[in-house]
Image: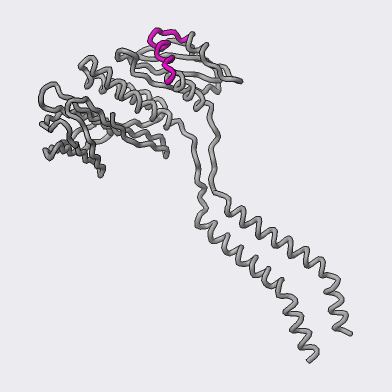
Amino acid sequence: MGVHKYNGVFMEMKGFMHTFESIIAVIILIGFLIFLRSNYVSTPYDITYRGYEILEDLDEKGELRDYVVSGDWIGLNSKINIPGYNHSIEFCNQTCIGYKPDKENVWSSVYIIGGKDVYEPYQIKLYIW
Amino acid sequence: MYMSLTKSNYISGKKGQFFLIGALLFSMVFYLGISARFSENIVVRHSDLKYLYNNIEKEYTHVFNLGLNESDELEKLVNFTIFIKNIARERNINFESLVIFTKNDTEDLEVTLINNFDNQINITINVSDDVKNVSLNSGSYTILSFSPPDEFVMEIMFNNTKRELLLEKYKANIYFIISLRRGDDVIKGDFLA
């Protein structure tokens, strides 16, 4: 009789045990998958990279240096479009011409050229805010 | 006997649970052990150094060509190196370079070396088995003279770095090694044009 009762108790708990086992199995599986996930943490994409890419692209198209050697920072600035952001340009050698914003949280991208047809180094600064 | 059979059935009936608990314990030990070993996250940084590196690589060659046009390549390259170094410093980047260029105004080949590393370097130049060793201070340059055939191999050795370049005597060549460093971010490379 004791045996039947013993067996009876466990028969009633059989469903609970199956559920519990399933939960344990899922926990093990999820834990394993989390472990397999790469421990890579990626830093966010910075808008300054976009600035570099814009200036590099204009140089590859052969448009950048003409603006710089002629001092036409306004023309270069109007050539650039960054949706959602304001921007300004500065050309610097010994001194700088252009507009440097007096604001907080301004990103700046710098592109260097050695000149166009003669040696005349400049750094082109693209400010984005 | 009846009781023994029941106990035996009880144990065999519980085999699954025992396996599960064993697996759970094993996994916990495994994760703890592996986590302790590989606890450091690998940080993938997006860095602006690569943009500056590509920019400098392109412009060094361009400045060399502009200098050749004015027969003033040494001064232009030295001046440009200082220009880049100042810009890099403003952005907390340490810029170092070694520039080597060849040209011939006479029948001899001139090999010019410009050291922009922070330290003195000892460099060996081997042009068609003519070997010259120089010790170059930081921020200084030297000009070596060789008499190679029209096509030759120039071997460069310094700081455990060895390069073999196939060059032409009657063509101006520029080879440079660039290093950009900001904290743990480092980009190094070399280029021949």
Which residues make up the magenta segment? A60-73
The C terminus of chain A lies in quadrant: top right
Residue B138 placement: quadrant? top left
Does the stretch in magenta take in A61? yes
Q: Is residue B169 left or right of residue B7?
A: left
Residue A28 in picture, x, y percent from top left: 66, 60
Placement of A26 over or under A98, stated as above or below: below
Rendering coords of residue B80 (x, y %): 30, 21
Q: How many marks?
A: 0
Name the residue rendered at 23%, 18% in the picture.
Answer: B68
Which residue appears at 53% of the width and 26% of the height? A47
Image-based side of B3 in relation to B117, left or right: right
Instruction: Tell me: residue A121, above or below residue B153.
Output: above
Q: Nearer the viewer, residue B148 or A38?
A: B148
Residue at the image position 51 percent from the left and 23 percent from the top: A107
Identify the image quadrant of the N terminus of chain A: bottom right
Q: Is residue B182 magenta?
A: no
Colouring used for the render: one colour
Rendering coords of residue A102 (x, y %): 52, 15
The reply, left or right, for residue B174 in relation to residue B51 is left
For residue A84, which quarter of the picture? top right
Given residues B44 and A53, the one toward you in this image is A53
| Residue projecting furthest to the bottom | B1
Q: Residue furthest front?
A: B150
**Residue at image location 51% in from the left, 13% down from the top:** A79
